[in-house]
Amino acid sequence: MKLAVLGLGALLCLSSAARAADCLDVAKKDIEQKGFTVEDSILEEVSRPANSSTTGYSAWFRVTKCEKGYIIVNMHGGCQIADHWAAGECETPEIHQAIGEQ
């Protein structure tokens, strides 16, 4: 019985890791389609509200057009893109327009 529970736990962890990788790929493709070249990326799980189960992801991208800032893609748990925003040196009118941020 313990083995079955451990196996199920491992399977769920792999499923969660696969989902995260899928979401990062979705976000990266979206950013590249907007004309950016991705140099580095970070994905974080986001809980809304705090202390709940993971309900989404935020993907942070360092792109060639801004070396000291990020373009962030917020996603729902199913990898659907919710919104984009810019931080640091990425907060320029050109980048805001490219990502569709007001």
Image: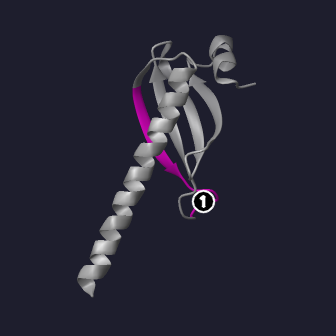
Q: Which residues are magenta?
A: 40-51
> Residue 73: x percent and y percent?
57, 35
Query: What x and y, as percent, mark residue 53?
Result: 54, 64
Tag 1's secondary structure?
loop
Is residue 46 placed above or below 85 in the rendered structure? below
What residue is at 45 percent from the left and 14 percent from the top?
64
Q: Is residue 35 above or below residue 52?
A: above
Q: Quick one: 76 or 51, which is closer to the camera? A: 76
In the rendered image, is residue 66 in sight? yes
Q: Is residue 97 left or right of residue 11?
A: right
Quadrant that contains the C terminus: top right
Q: Which residue is mark 1?
A: 50
Is residue 70 in view?
Answer: no
The colour mode here is one colour
Decide which of 101, 24 is in the foreground and name it. 24
Quadrant the N terminus occupies? bottom left
The residue closer to the viewer here, 66 or 11, is: 11
Q: Position of residue 5 (x, y in %)?
A: 31, 80
Q: Quadrant of residue 2?
A: bottom left
Q: Is residue 55 magenta?
A: no
Identify which amino acid the numbered label 1 is placed on: Ala
Seen at 40% across and 44% down, the residue is 21
**Residue lying at 50% horizontally and 37% vertically, measured from the top left:** 26
Answer with the quarter of the image where residue 96 lies: top right
The residue lying furthest to the left in this view is 3
48 part of magenta stretch = yes
Give how far across and how far down residue 79 sits, in percent.
55, 46
| Residue at left offset 45%, top offset 39% | 24
